[in-house]
Amino acid sequence: MMSCVLGIDIGSAFSKGIIMCDQKIVGSYITPSGGNYKLTADRVREELLSKAGLSSKDIIYTVATGYGAKNVTFADDVITDISCHSRGIFYLFPSVRTIVDVGDLFSKAFRINERGNSLTFLLSGKCAGGCARVLQVIARVLQIKVDEIGELSLRSRKRIDFNTGCAVFAETEAVSRIAEGASKEDLLAGIHRALAAQINSLVERVGVERDYALVGGGARDIGLIKALEEITGFNIVVPEDPHMTAALGAAIIAGGKFKSA
């Protein structure tokens, strides 16, 4: 009989879930979090069970993480997203020691040891200029989809340097630059550079130890990845599904919790 566990990450913007049976991923799901985290958590579980052909009775342990984790009423345990990202990345890339999570509300930088346990971490300030929210703000100003901005920024020939790291002022500055005739490509390259500089400052305070991985929704932006690589001089490790690593780590921890119970 298979031993199946569930990891669920209720983020401020998106909620993700992963089911693992006998330490293998058998189902994953992502959906916008919406305003009711409890209902979203229930929907994530239902979709995952349906995909995997399982019932709730088949899940022997559930770990919840993320911004709305306390709303997951069916969870057996709640674990910090930093611990979950750490375990998820360690499962995928055992050589990684420095991780940056570029989330919707905050960016987090943390270091892990050779066992995948977090050692130290720092959180970005409240200003959205240091997280993925600024990318959404600029995409709205330019009237393009967030998913398009990474590739578009790589076409830049003359990057626009932003004078601020604040999302509100960046929006105002972007509008002014467009009025002056700046291209979307050059403007996006500039905002990626500004965000990368803020992230790099956070990482330097934590202390960089290679290998270096990027996770979270912002890690799906190739323009941000390239900007960070230019600043750091490192090749940055990015999982195939960087927004799913906390859910993956939660599932891995769930498996360990059941074994130790």
Image (cartoon, rainbow, N blue to C red):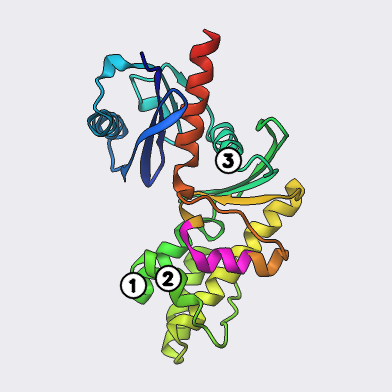
Determine whether label 3 and label 2 are within 8 Å by CB.
no
Q: CA distance from mark 3 to mark 2?
A: 25 Å
What x and y, as percent, mark residue 160? 56, 82
Q: Going from the N terminus, do you reach mark 1 or mark 3 first?
A: 3
Res. 32 visible in picture: no
- Find the magenta span and give its range: 220-228
Tell me the mark number nearer the camera, choosing from 1 and 3. Answer: 3
Q: Which mark is residue 144?
A: 1
> How crowded is the residue under tag 2: few (<14 C-alpha within 10 Å), some, or many (20+)?
many
> Does the segment drawn in magenta span residue 142?
no
- Name the amino acid, label 1: Ile
What amino acid type should be assigned to the residue bearing mark 2? Ile
Query: Along the line of sight, which residue is nearer the eye, 125 or 62?
Result: 62
Locate the N terminus by quadrant.
Answer: top left
- Image coordinates of residue 133 in percent, x first then y, are 45, 57
The question of residue 225 being in magenta is answered with yes
Q: Residue at x 49, y 20 (%)?
A: 255
Quick one: SS at disc 2? helix
- The x and y percentages for residue 72 are 35, 25
Amino acid type, residue under disc 3 in the picture: Ile
Q: Could you tell me residue 21's position as x and y percent?
A: 40, 24
The secondary element bearing badge 3 is classed as helix
Residue 31's place in the image compared with 144, above or below, is above
Dot 3 or dot 2, earlier in sequence: 3
Asked whether disc 1 touches disc 2, contact meaning CB atoms under 8 Å apart, the reply is yes
Give the residue pinned by disc 2: 149
Cα distance between the residues tagged 1 and 2: 7 Å
